[in-house]
Structures are given as C-alpha cells and as structure tokens.
Amino acid sequence: MVNPLPSQFPRRRRPRSGGFTLIEVLVVIIIAAVLAGIAAPGWLAFLNRQRVSAVKSDLVQTLKKAQSDAIQRRQEVAVEIVTGTTAPTVKVGKPQRDTTTGAVTGVSGPSQTLGDNDANPGGITLTAKSLNASDQVINTNTRIIFDYQGLPTSDSPIPFIVGIKPQGSSAEQCVVIANLLGSVKTADNATLIPPDNRDACDPAAWNPTPDDDE
C-alpha cells in the first residue's frame, strides 16, 4: 500500500487567538456608562431613604427614652435639636432654667448623633417646627421637655415636629408630638391631613390635633 504524500493531507488552521477589538471594548464601556447614569440617581435616592429612616427611628427611640427616663427619675428631661452641625444631632438631659424667670436656657447633657454614619453622606438635616401665638410656623423652638409623668411641660411647643430631609430633596419625613399626652408619631410631607389638606410635616396640620385612631 502506498502511503499518501504529506501534501495530500489537509492543513490544520491555527486557531485565532481570543480577545476583543478596541471598538468592542469601547462599545462595552459606553453601554456600562449609560446604564450607570440611569441607575445612579435611583440608587442614591434609595440610600438617602434608608439614611432618613435610620435617623427617624433613632429620633423616635430618643424621645421615648427621654419620656421613660423622666418618669423613672421623677424629674424633667429635655430633648434639644442641635443646629449648625454636620450630622443630625440631638442633646438629651436636664433642662437648664433661668433662676428668675424659669425660662429654659439650654440642656445639660451629652450630644447624640442620629443615624448610621457620623459623616452624614446624605447631608441629612433636622428642622424643629412649631407654631407661634399667631399660628405661624417657626423654627426657633428647638427643644421639647417632658415632666415627671412623661408629658410635655406647659412651656413646650405643641405640636412639636422635627423634619428630616436629605440634601437636595423635597421629600421630608418627620417625627411629631401632636398633643399634651406626648404620643410620638411619624409622618411624611406626602400625607395630607384634613380638613385643610396640609402636609403632615406642617405644624398647622396638627392644630387642633386631628383625631387619633390609634
């Protein structure tokens, strides 16, 4: 039998080396950038909602603990919203009163940062809101005081609302002490309260206090 000549065998083609062309890589980068640009705002909004929820939860617990401490110690305990800080901060302790007028001049107690991150990446701010004698919204009353029964004192602003809002957002969560019983509620400015349909973070919406169904 005659062996076939080597030239009679088909030549094997060397496999093409794997990889991507420069154009293919650029296309993938562009697509990824577009998708990231679409997803980033939603992701940041989600993170800010989580941060606001954490701050709101901490504030509710702080107010309730202050009430509990006032009852246990049989003395006044104040919660003050601290302004001018880089992170949402409150101060809890005994109210300092003027020896002549009895007016509260401050709170002697430690400051507490609310939320999960002292760096406050969401730029979350706290705003104390109440009403003056003309039923106008003011931000100057920054503290609520609980007496030995855990009830707001007569010189505490009622309703007392603390708005919680991330930087650059119109959405606002809030913690509300709406009546002299000192019950702590949570709400948001997307909720409207009849009869005037004011948003629930507006102190005027709670004056007079709406019926409590709880």
Image (cartoon, helix red, strand yellow):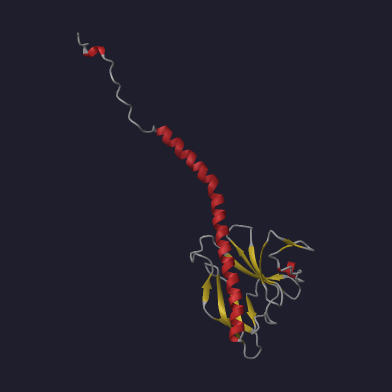
Q: Nearer the viewer, residue 70 or 45?
A: 70
- 36 w.r.t. 64: above or below: above
Q: Residue at x 48, y 64 (%)?
A: 119
Figure quadrant of residue 136: bottom right
Q: Quadrant of the C terminus?
A: bottom right
Figure quadrant of residue 196: bottom right
- 60 w.r.t. 30: above or below: below
Residue 104 placement (x, y as % from top left): 63, 83
Task: Find the residue positioned furthest to the right.
Answer: 195
Q: Residue at x 65, y 85 (%)?
A: 103
Residue 206 placement (x, y as % from top left): 73, 69
Say whether residue 100 is visible: yes
Say whether residue 105 is visible: no
Q: Quadrant of the N terminus?
A: top left
122 displayed left or right of 192: left
- 146 w.r.t. 188: above or below: below
Residue 186 placement (x, y as % from top left): 65, 66
Q: Residue at x 70, y 60 (%)?
A: 191
Task: Find the residue positioned furthest to the top.
Answer: 2
Figure quadrant of residue 91: bottom right
Residue 102 placement (x, y as % from top left): 65, 88
